[in-house]
Image (cartoon, rainbow, N blue to C red):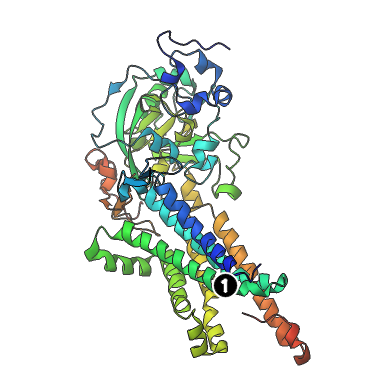
Amino acid sequence: MLIKKPADLRYSETTPKSVYMNRRKFLASVPAAALAGRELLSPSRGLATTKLPDLVKSPLSTDEKQNTLDQVTHYNNYYEFGTQKDQPAKYAANFKTDPWTVSVEGEVEKKRKFSMDEILKLAPLEERIYRHRCVERWSIVVPWIGYSLSALLKAVGPTSKAKYVAFETYWDLKQMPMATPERSGLQYPYVEGLRLDEAMHPLALLCVGMFGETLPPQDGAPVRLVVPWKYGFKSIKSIVKIKLVTSEPPTTWNISNAHEYGFYSNVNPNVDHPRWSQAKETRLPSPFANRPTQIFNGYGDQVASLYAGMDLKKNY
Amino acid sequence: MLRNRWTKVLVFLLCLAPLGWMVARALGFGGGQTIIAIQGGKVTFNGGIEDALGNLTANPLEYVTHFTGDWTVRFIVFTLAVTPLRKLLHLPDLIRFRKMIGLFAFFYGCLHLSTWLFLDKLFDPAGMLQGMLKDVVKRPFITAGSAALLAMLPLAITSTTGWIRRLGGKRWQRLHRLVYFSGIAAVVHYYWLVKSDVRLPLMYGAMVAVLLAYRMGAWLISRSAKPAQKRTVPAVT
């Protein structure tokens, strides 16, 4: 296999040392299709990601200080690749995301299987810098890339019976040996859900990248959801199935512990997790839990109306 | 070898090693920002406490809390293992290290508590005590953890030979059985706080259970044994 390099650049200038010192491993981890692409060697620490060009800056972005790529790729909750935060970076490194299809089915006018290429071209890619708040009390700021999930849903046309959207993560024990109830305490495949009006909200992002490039595997490659006003576990990773349904779908953490993780799971300083207070949060990498949690993670102006008249303590 | 004076020093250093490892990581040995540099006998600092904590993963509060908590429960297990190992391996001299290992369990427990106080609560000194008490009452896993550490306090205080003399061996021994409670409470604390992966707490739970079952067995045997045989039966300590 021949890798062409630009004449005026040397590998050492474009490639992190950790990559070229592990060339064999790196090659094994890069799908052939990506090798043929123009932007092969990303500046990101050993990640087999490719650059996403022509991004539109979104007005929905926050101007808060962003976390670093290193932080966002080495501190992950992705239980299929291990329950410790540093494990997904190691165990997802060779996760195969090409070819990839997302099946959209259920209560829709046009059932359809999307290839990743089709998903990348369905709507203009935007960079959206969102706050991301984990139920574990930490938060980060990430420059995601994608477009509103509503674009995809409109492409298939929900029927009048569709009331909820159910999502499912890829599940493959060969690639995800930790993804069993015995090894990580959850039922698989990982499933999540939104009410249709939540899913149609412009803030709900169908995400294909971050930091200007495609998603690294540990962050949910190749396509994930980002719902910034809800706790992080609602933002399901590595989606293979989206089904429009008539009633509230089961969700993984709710199955694991209904008392602690509700279907809605909106960020809310006034509704504590039964085992810890949600009043404050730690904005990583700060070591202090000293930042007041904002209702709906600061997106209340946009989304509070979705829950008008609802008791948020009951519908946690 | 166990009787050698230097063995105790060695065990002391081994007990301190986990803390040393964490501090070294915080100072930037093993990657990250180099906080302390030694060049030509000159020591220079290139960062403060927050930079050092920054070397401990993206979430230093969680890292330090888990690290010190893990080592507390491990040292409780080590302490509980001393007596069974002495008897089963016929190494009576292991007793020389029991006090030190027990005190290290308390030491790591105090570090664990301090992490919670300084990183989680200190930002609001006025509300700290109130916030603490509220957590202890409202959150069962914190109640269990506090109880585990609190039960170790009298044991740490009365760990000296002077206190053994003052209390008398029997009473001292009875008091120090509180460590059984600490072991159980520490495991319950751990079990209650994890989100879904309970493998580690279950592993420590199994260890504590085996070590307590050993004592229960030894006690039952000694109770049913004839007085003449009593000397050969392991005492429950």
Q: Position of residue B10 (x, y in %)?
A: 56, 62
- Front residue of B230/B189: it is B230
Where does residue A143 sit, x and y in percent of width and height? 33, 31
Residues A293 and A30: in front is A30
* Horizontal side, residue B89 vs residue B114: left or right: right
Which image quadrant for residue A145? top left
Q: Is residue B212 above or below residue B57?
A: below
Name the residue tied to disc 1. B98
Residue B50: percent from left, percent from top:
31, 48
Amino acid carrying mark 1 in the image: Arg
Q: Secondary structure at mark 1?
A: helix
Q: Nearer the viewer, residue A157 or B204?
A: B204
Residue found at the very far bottom of the displayed protein = B227
Residue nearer the viewer, B5 or A183: B5
Q: Residue furthest top?
A: A7
Image position of B46 with respect to B194: above or below: above
